[in-house]
Amino acid sequence: MSLKEYDNKNISQDIKDNNIENNNNPNDDKEELCERLLNQYGDTMLRVCYQYLKDYHLAEDAVQETFIKAVNNYNSFKGNSTEKTWLTRIALNCCKNIMRTHWFKYVYSSMTESNFTLPSNTHNNSCSQEHENVLEAVMSLKRADREVIILYYYMEFSLKEIAQITGQAENTINQRLHRARKRLKKGMNHVLGKET
C-alpha cells in the first residue's frame, strides 16, 4: 500500500479526531490543505523519515505526526523558506522526538546493520549492488552525518536550505557535509573490503 493510499485516509481522520484548529484560511480548509500537502510532499517526507529512522513503520508514524503538526500550525508558516523545507524541518524534529524515547533506544540498540533492508514498496528490483553498498554505508553513519548526507544528496537540498531546516549556519553545514563525505568514503571502503 502506498503512502498516498494509506496516509491520506488516516491523517485526514486523525485531523478530524484531534479537532485540529482552523487555520483561518478561507481558501483551504483543513482536509484540502492536508490532501494537498500529502499529495505534494508525502512520499518525500516518508523517504526522509525512513532514511533517518531506519524503520518503515516508525517513519510512517513520523510522517503522520509531521502532517498533523503542519496542518495544525500552517498559519505559523511565514514563507521564509519553501513548504518542502518547512515540512522537512518538522519531519526531522518528529524523527528526533521518536529517537529520544526509551523504547526506540532499546530497539535501536538491538538492531544490526546486517538485518537492515528496504521495505518492499521502496525497493527497486533493478537496484545495482553499488546502490546497495552506498545505502548500507550511508545508513551506518552516525545520525548527524547521515542527516546532512540524506538532505544534500538524496533530497537535493542546497546548503542554504539545509541550514534553514537544521537551524544551523550555512558554514557549519558545509563543514558537517565535508566531514560526512570523508566518513562515508571510509565507510564505503569498509563495505567494499578495501583498506584505507
Image: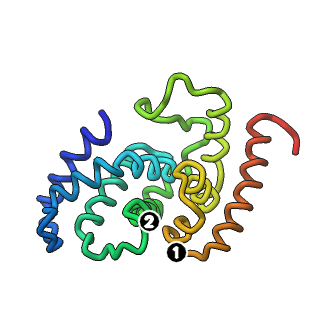
Query: Could you say where residue 13 lies in the image, as x and y percent from the top left?
Result: 15, 52
Would you say the residues marked 1 and 2 are in contact, meaning their CB atoms lie under 8 Å apart? yes
Query: Could you say where residue 52 lies in the image, as x and y percent from the top left?
Result: 51, 53
Q: Secondary structure at mark 1?
A: loop
Q: Residue at x 49, y 55 (%)?
A: 106
| Quarter of the figure with residue 24 | bottom left
Q: Residue at x 31, y 36 (%)?
A: 2
Q: Residues within 10 Å of mark 2 (few under 14, many from 20)?
A: some
| Quarter of the figure with residue 85 | bottom left
Q: Secondary structure at mark 2?
A: helix
* Disc on res. 167: 1
Query: Could you say where residue 50 lies in the image, as x and y percent from the top left?
Result: 46, 47
Tell me which amino acid carries mark 2. Arg
| Quarter of the figure with residue 122 | top left
Q: Earlier in the sequence, mark 1 or mark 2?
A: 2
| 151 sits left or right of 33 in the view | right
* Disc on res. 18: none
